[in-house]
Image (spheres, rainbow, N blue to C red):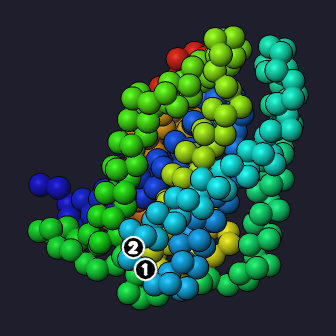
């Protein structure tokens, strides 16, 4: 018979892993299209959380309205991020520039700079202290499932993740936008030659990925009851690790590895103090780099 505490930790870990998965998908989408890592994705997560909190404090609307506002803000943040940090490096569209390591490193540093500036601006605007979520919006009501206890936050994160992951699959495989994203991801130059507007496709990719990250931010904020300017850093690192483990450009791989990572962190607290659980992610990253340079679900397209 399974230990009740162990089962409880698995349930908690899966909830955490779903949050990492939503963020990891954003990383993976952008890497698949541009072949670069977006290190400002954690700040999109934080922007979504603050957008939701501001909406709640100003208008106190139903939760579904808060989510819709956060989706819109996430899309706008993704658009702005692409225009500021990535678009200037896409002036050269020849094959040599697209595959240039120097260009990829410059883009990476650009996103990192935007990340730092955005974080500092949010700290100046909202202050460095943790902002409490109004009690009536907190997702912490207890639900008893036999020996296992979950909260409304666990259920809300599960439902939101399932809906958005399903919507993403429909977008990618049932719409023209999704077809364009997959085409540009497979071969950017080839997509241009057959008439696909790659600039518009890249913008759409950033907007979709940022919408997922923003919703993850507000869901975690409502679940934990606090929001602060640096809240996106740790989940951003974990989502990046999940993307690397999954093989950089594999969305199913990123989701599976995010769930593995979240569950492993939760179970590890049974053997380690909570302050040491972050080592789990870094340990997985080191092992992946050493033994699985293409990632667990990679297809040999590129080494991590």
Q: How far apart are marks 1 and 2 (CA)?
A: 6 Å
Q: In this view, does 300 lie above or below 235?
A: above
Image side of residue 24 versus residue 206, left or right: left
Q: How many numbered discs?
A: 2
Q: Which of marks 1 and 2 is in front?
A: 1
Residue 6 shows in the view: no
The answer to which of 202 and 304 lies nearer the viewer is 202
Quarter of the image that includes the C terminus? top right
Q: Is residue 117 above or below residue 238?
A: below
- Residue appearing at x 33%, y 49% in the figure: 162
Q: Name the residue beneath numbered marker 2.
A: 63
Residue 119 shows in the view: yes
Marks 1 and 2 in Cβ contact (< 8 Å): no
Q: Looking at the rendering, which quadrant does residue 109 occupy?
A: top right
The answer to which of 2 and 234 lies nearer the viewer is 234
State the image coordinates of residue 45 (x, y, percent, origin top left). 59, 60
The answer to which of 231 and 296 lies nearer the viewer is 231
- Residue appearing at x 86%, y 38% in the figure: 88
User: Badge 2, how many Cα within 10 Å: few under 14, some, many 20+?
Assistant: few
Q: Name the residue beneath numbered marker 1.
A: 61
């Amino acid at each position: 018979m399974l230990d009740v505490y162990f089962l409880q930790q698995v349930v908690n870990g899966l909830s955490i892993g779903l949050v990492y998965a939503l963020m990891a998908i954003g990383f993976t989408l952008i890497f698949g299209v541009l072949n670069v890592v977006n290190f400002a994705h954690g700040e999109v997560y934080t922007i979504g959380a603050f957008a939701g909190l501001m909406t709640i404090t100003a208008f106190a609307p139903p939760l579904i309205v808060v989510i819709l506002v956060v989706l819109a803000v996430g899309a706008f943040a993704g658009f702005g991020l692409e225009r500021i940090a990535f678009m200037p490096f896409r002036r050269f569209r020849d094959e040599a520039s697209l595959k240039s390591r120097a260009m990829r490193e410059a883009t990476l540093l650009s996103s990192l700079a935007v990340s730092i500036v955005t974080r500092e601006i949010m700290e100046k605007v909202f202050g460095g202290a943790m902002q409490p979520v109004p009690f009536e919006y907190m997702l912490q009501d207890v639900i008893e499932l036999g020996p296992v206890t979950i909260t409304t936050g666990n259920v809300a994160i599960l439902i939101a993740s399932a809906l958005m992951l399903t919507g993403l699959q429909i977008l990618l495989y049932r719409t023209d936008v999704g077809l364009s994203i997959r085409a540009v991801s497979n071969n950017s130059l080839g997509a241009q030659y057959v008439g696909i507007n790659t600039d518009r496709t890249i913008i759409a990719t950033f907007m979709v990925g940022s919408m997922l990250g923003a919703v993850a931010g507000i869901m975690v904020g409502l679940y934990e009851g606090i929001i602060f300017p640096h809240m996106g850093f740790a989940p951003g690192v974990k989502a990046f690790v999940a993307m690397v483990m999954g093989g950089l450009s594999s969305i199913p791989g990123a989701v599976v590895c995010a769930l593995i990572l979240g569950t492993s962190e939760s179970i590890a607290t049974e053997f380690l103090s909570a302050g040491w659980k972050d080592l789990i992610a870094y340990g997985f990253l080191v092992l992946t780099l050493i033994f699985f340079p293409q990632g667990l679900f990679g297809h040999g397209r590129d080494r991590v």
